[in-house]
Structures are given as structure tokens and as C-alpha cells.
Amino acid sequence: MNQHYLPGNPPLEINLRRSKQAKRLSLRVSRLDGRVTLTIPKSLPQSHAIAFAMEKENWLRSQQRNQSSIVKVDVGTRIPLAGRERLICSGTGRRIVATDDALHVPGPPETAPRRLLGHLKQVARADLAAASDYYAQKLGQSYARLSIRDTRSRWGSCSSQRGLMYSWRLVMAPPAVSTYVAAHEVAHLAEMNHSASFWRLVQDLYGDYQAPRNWLRENGHDLHRYRFED
């Protein structure tokens, strides 16, 4: 993917993406980080695509201004955990301790973001593995492996090799949301599609899934605001 910069203060970075399937030009501003992607049909000259983007510059900049601001995580920052906002504090001992309103991180303050990131990934893996095991047993299916990543475009996936993948950032969402995602992905072990049969299966496994699904649509992008590393 190539980049083009529209001049201004600041310059506007546009990621150029050629597509054999695209029938027309399209511009997308990611709700996660404000990244601009211009999809270009294979046969269209790049100069035409750039001209199109220049016409849309005011709209693009307004979309980026409306993005949620990035939060650099450090001691004194508030972040959500299990749907509840907690203050990151300096702690004692060796372990990170979560209370109702705080996360106590031991060690030098400058290491807190890295240590907290590792802790959250561990908690996410444990929670999502437990939920996946529960739903897989309920379904009478098994999965081959489980991985935790920091994905931009999806909260989870199930591969044709029966591997489950989840975004570790689900640990910040309300528990009902992360367990819904686990039920969703486990359901793919039996239905590798999004047919009516698949959604009935999710309903059987989880129950009424509309509220957590809506929560992700409306609030999920905010979980990507938090930056633990430069």
C-alpha cells in the first residue's frame, strides 16, 4: 500500500490501495485511528484518484477531527477494565492488583505501560480461553488453538483449521461483550458462515446477543484509543 500526502497543516496522509474488485473510487476514514484509505480500481490512473481525494479534503479533515483522541497510557491515566474505568497507580510488591477503581502497577513508573500491557494480555487470554472452553463444550466441538492479538478490523475470528483468535482489547469491554465474542467465534466451529443457522446457533449458545453486539458497534472503536507503546 502506497501513501500520498495532501499539503496542509498538518499534511493529510492517504493510503492508496489498488483493487481488482473495486468498480469505483472509495474513501474510508477508520474509526479506530483516523487512517484514510483510498481504494482505486485497477484500471484508473492514480492521478484521477488523487484529484478525487483533493476534492474531498475538507470532508476528510472534518472526519479526522471527530475521531476520539488517542490516550497515551501511563501512571495517572484512566483506562477501562471489564467495562469499568480505573486509575493507573504506582503499586508495591510484584503483581499488578486491580481494585474497583484502580490498577496498582509495581516497579518504576516508566515501565508501567509495558507491564500493564502484558498483564492485560494475560487476563484477556485467560478469560477468553475460559469462555471458549465453556461454549465449545456446550456445542460439542473442539478448537485447535487460541491466540491473542491486537487486531484493527475484527474482534475475533475462527480459521478453517479451527484456530480461534481474539483481540486482547476485549478485556477492557464489559464481560458480557467479550463472552459474546467468544460464543460468536465458537459457533463458527459448526457454521463457518453468517447464515441464519449461524445466528440461531449463537442465540442458543449465548442467549440474546443484540445488546453486546450493539455495544461493540457503538463503542468498540474507543478501545483502540489507548496506546501502551510508542
Image (tube, grey):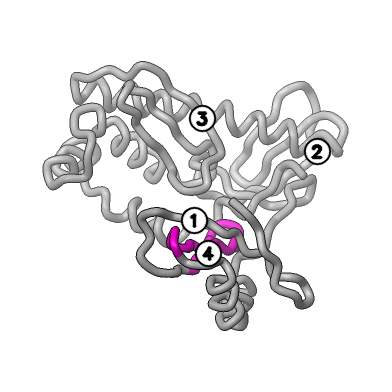
- Select label 2 or label 3 by which is in front: 3
For mark 1, what is the residue? 18
Q: Is residue 179 above or below residue 59?
A: above
Earlier residue among tags 4 and 3: 4
Q: Gap between marks 2 and 3, in whole Å?
A: 27 Å
Q: Which of the pair 170/106 is nearer the observer? A: 170
Q: In this view, does 216 lie above or below 6?
A: above
Residue shown at 23% from the left, 34% from the top: 192
Task: Kindly identify the amino acid type of the residue bearing the numbered disc 1.
Answer: Arg
- Select label 3 or label 1 by which is in front: 1
| Image quarter (top left, top right, bottom left or bottom right) of the C terminus | top right
- Select label 2 or label 1 by which is in front: 1
The kind of secondary structure element at disc 3 is: strand
Residue 38 is tagged as 4
Q: Gap between marks 3 and 1, in whole Å?
A: 30 Å
Task: Kindly identify the amino acid type of the residue bearing the numbered disc 4.
Answer: Leu
Residue shown at 30% from the left, 26% from the top: 160
Left or right of 5? Residue 186 is: left
Residue shown at 54% from the left, 61% from the top: 37
Earlier residue among tags 2 and 3: 2
